[in-house]
Image (tube, rainbow, N blue to C red):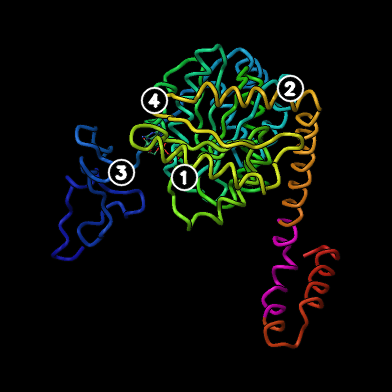
């Protein structure tokens, strides 16, 4: 020990395990106390323990068996329902097996619902409309599950939580259940998880499933592929720049509703409704034998909400009679199977070690013009089919 190295006994309690036993100041390794008010130190929260290691909050929840999940979901236990959905959303292989086993047991109790997708521009009032519609339905004895789907992003986990402020009353009702969007992951990602979440909610006795799309683009098609009825929420005077988006999405919709038909906006909303009605004449209807029409409503004061639900009920009655409803569901299920097969194959191909190794060279050759794209594909596929490393 050199002259400057004074053993500091009082600091020894801060000695991390990797610091030599009697190292003094020469060793830079020592732990400092956590600071209250830091990034995770809320004022008033207890300081981190002096060893600097804080174990994650221990879940005191016991592990559930498949039986527990099934009986909890069926018995209307909201906390178990939440955990069942978390299980479905998990990407851990062990959870996936468990989730599938649970779903198998729940499947006989699914399908007794109407699944309604709600899409529209950001700020059109989707969440407010779901709040109004959801409360209206709960008052009428329905049980309503609200899900959000955002296939485009994995960072929106909290967005429907923000939306809960728009669903203030609904989120406190016993007849309603609100669930945020899962973050994207493997094997079918958000679409798979959302579909399975719908099934779990149905098995729990929710007879109306409202699915809000978040984000624009891909989400409309994804949600359309999992719902019976697709509602497009619009507002008057949203501008011509959105017309392109409108037409594509309009052809997916079973009803258009011009929201915010209240106050000074009433006349404009009515004008927009008749304008959209004209446009609808020229579009392909989304559902065989059903005429897509435009309506007005105010999600804020509730006007037009019962009538809007009347449209959904007419739709259900009519398409059930003609079997269009059941046919669509069967097709959606088969499309879902196909999509999962495609996801699986795509993942196995691109994760194949041989393919991965070969890819950079193939890309270089294609770009250099010494290999045609078709030949490149042939080589990669041959490599994939040969298997091995
Ligand atoms: N005047 C009026 N305002 C409304 C109505 N519906 C919604 N709003 C308002 O419009 C704003 C956006 O409403 P949201 O329900 O959050 O819209 P959203 O479509 O869910 O928005 P994103 O989820 O961000 O895409 C809020 O300030 C609402 O209070 C309505 O019927 N009338
Ligand atoms: Mg919203």
Q: Nearer the viewer, residue 272 or 180?
A: 272
Mark 2 and mark 4 lie on one chain; the one further toward the N terminus is: 2
The local secondary structure at tag 2 comes to helix
- Residue 291 picture quarter: top right
> Dot 4 lies on which element?
loop
Spatial CA distance of label 2 from label 3 is 45 Å
> Which residue lies at the image location 17% right of the left edge and 45% below the top edge?
10
In the displayed structure, 193 sits above or below 304; it is: below
> Residue 3, how many percent across, how many down?
13, 65
Q: Nearer the viewer, mark 4 or mark 3?
A: 4
Where are the magenta residues, as a range?
347-363
Tell me if mark 4 has few (under 14), some (14-19) or many (20+) residues whose alpha carbon lies within 10 angstroms of its own: few
Q: Real-space Cα distance between discs 2 and 4?
A: 42 Å
Label 2 sits on residue: 105
- At horizontal 59% and vertical 45% (from top left) the residue drawn is 278
The residue that disc 3 covers is: 52
Q: Which residue is mark 1?
A: 156
Residue at mark 4: 301
Mark 2 Cβ and ligand 2 under 8 Å apart: no
Q: Is residue 39 above or below residue 128?
A: below
What numbered label is drawn on residue 144?
Answer: none
Lateral position of residue 133 relative to residue 16, left or right:
right
What secondary structure is found at the residue carrying circle 1? loop
């Amino acid at each position: 020990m050199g002259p400057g190295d004074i053993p500091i006994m009082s600091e020894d309690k801060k000695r991390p395990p990797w610091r030599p036993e009697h190292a003094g100041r020469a060793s830079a390794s020592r732990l400092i106390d956590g600071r209250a008010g830091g990034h995770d130190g809320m004022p008033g929260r207890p300081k981190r323990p002096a060893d600097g290691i804080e174990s994650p909050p221990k879940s005191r929840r016991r592990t559930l068996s498949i039986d527990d999940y099934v009986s909890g979901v069926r018995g209307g236990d909201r906390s178990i329902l939440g955990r069942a959905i978390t299980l479905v959303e998990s990407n851990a292989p062990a959870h996936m097996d468990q989730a599938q086993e649970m779903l198998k047991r729940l499947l006989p109790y699914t399908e007794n619902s109407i699944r309604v997708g709600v899409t529209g521009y950001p700020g059109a009032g989707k969440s407010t409309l779901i709040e109004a519609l959801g409360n209206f339905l709960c008052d009428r004895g329905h049980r309503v599950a609200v899900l959000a789907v955002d296939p485009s992003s994995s960072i929106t986990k909290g967005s429907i939580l923000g939306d809960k402020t728009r669903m203030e009353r609904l989120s406190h009702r016993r007849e309603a259940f609100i669930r945020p969007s899962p973050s994207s992951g493997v094997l079918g990602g958000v679409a798979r998880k959302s579909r399975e979440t719908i099934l779990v909610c149905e098995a729990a006795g929710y007879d109306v499933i409202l699915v809000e799309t978040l984000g624009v683009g891909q989400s409309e098609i994804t949600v359309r592929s999992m719902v019976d009825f697709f509602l497009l929420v619009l507002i008057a005077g949203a501008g011509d720049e959105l017309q392109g988006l409108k037409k594509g999405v309009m052809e997916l919709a079973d009803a258009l509703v011009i929201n915010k038909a209240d106050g000074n906006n009433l006349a404009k909303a009515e004008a927009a409704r008749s304008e959209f009605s004209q446009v609808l004449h020229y579009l392909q209807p989304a559902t065989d034998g059903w005429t897509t029409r435009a309506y007005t409503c105010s999600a804020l004061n509730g006007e037009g909400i019962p009538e809007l639900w009347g449209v959904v009920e007419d739709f259900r009655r009519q398409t059930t009679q003609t079997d269009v409803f059941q046919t669509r569901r069967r097709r959606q299920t088969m499309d879902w199977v196909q999509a999962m097969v495609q996801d699986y194959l795509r993942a196995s191909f691109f994760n194949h070690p041989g393919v991965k190794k070969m890819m950079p060279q193939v890309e270089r050759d294609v770009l250099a013009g010494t290999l045609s794209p078709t030949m490149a594909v042939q080589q990669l596929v041959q490599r994939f089919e040969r298997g091995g490393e």
